[in-house]
Amino acid sequence: MDSAFDNLDAAGFLEIWQHFDADDNGYIEGNELDDFFRHMMKRLGPENVTDERVQKLKQRFMSAYDVTADGKLQIQELANMILPEDENFLLVFRREAPLDNSVDFMKIWRKYDVDCSGYISALELKAFLKDLFQKHLKEVSSDKLDEYTDAMMKIFDKNKDGCLDLNDLARILALQENFLLQFQMDACSKEERKKDFEKIFDHYDVSKTGALEGPEVDGFVKDMMGLVRPNLTSPELDKLKGILLRHCDVNKDGKIQKNELSLCLGVKPKLG
């Protein structure tokens, strides 16, 4: 294995792969292969990248995995050779179930944190993995499910207390970049702020009811606080959610109406 790949993880591998597999068909071919290996070497290795080194690396991988000699390189085949076993396992979830909305992420968190402890136990994680495989119509034996659960706990349970926190699950599910990072509410005109507010509210109002409730409030609070505290825990999120509701939920219905949120943020929403 090329030493340049030693520090590559599933997230980095998939980011590079998707840059070249634009149509997401699971393989790259032709001139894309040269560009792919050159890009990987430039990104991962401090050594000088020459055409000769690129061709050698390409030939090495193609001779090992292009079994049908069709000039195509499959994503899972390459991952099997490059990535450590634990990161290869992660790739399955990152490829099949990426999340770009913190509301959807919080729905998953609330569903599987059954005892509302603020952490995912091994049993709760097993239930999540079982549902995930069923969703993708994959048959997994009970023993294999136990094996996967144990592997996930070993990878992510940093303090070895038998539980995963909010940030661990976010990494497992490849939750995309904080939606609010694209906005600079204090650095634009009033009209621009109004337009940004509309985009923000629409993003978190997944149910399109005109009010944020349940996981929608969770997702908004997670992203809002994530701007200043990226490693927010579930108990902290619950506390901050309570504070937000006390300040913004004027009519005390347990929801945050659009006009209520606009008042909290100091933005007048567009009428109509």
Image (cartoon, helix red, strand yellow):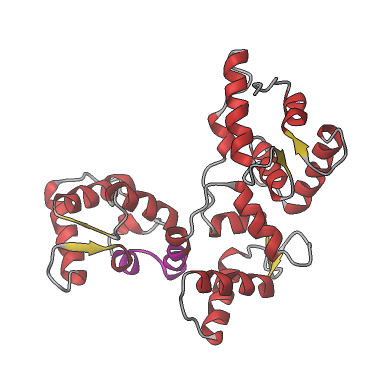
Helix, strand or loop for the magenta stretch, by majority: helix
Give the camera-side residue of 179 and 195: 195
Q: Residue 13 appears at what percent x and percent y?
A: 37, 55
Give the camera-side residue of 170 and 218: 218
Q: Residue 187 appears at what percent x and percent y?
A: 59, 17
Residue at the image point whose x is 27% and y is 49% from the top: 20
- Horizontal side of 117 relative to 64 (left or right) equals right
Residue at the image point whose x is 38% and y is 54% from the top: 14
Q: Is residue 198 above or below residue 127?
A: above
| Magenta region, residue range | 78-92
Query: Where is residue 67, by image quadrant?
Result: bottom left
- Horizontal side of 119 relative to 67 (left or right) equals right
Q: Residue 42 appears at what percent x and percent y?
A: 27, 45
Q: Is residue 80 magenta?
A: yes
- Horizontal side of 42 relative to 225 (left or right) equals left
Residue at the image point whose x is 51% and y is 83% from the top: 144
Query: Where is residue 260, by image quadrant?
Result: top right
Give the camera-side residue of 22 and 191: 191
Farthest residue toward the top? 189
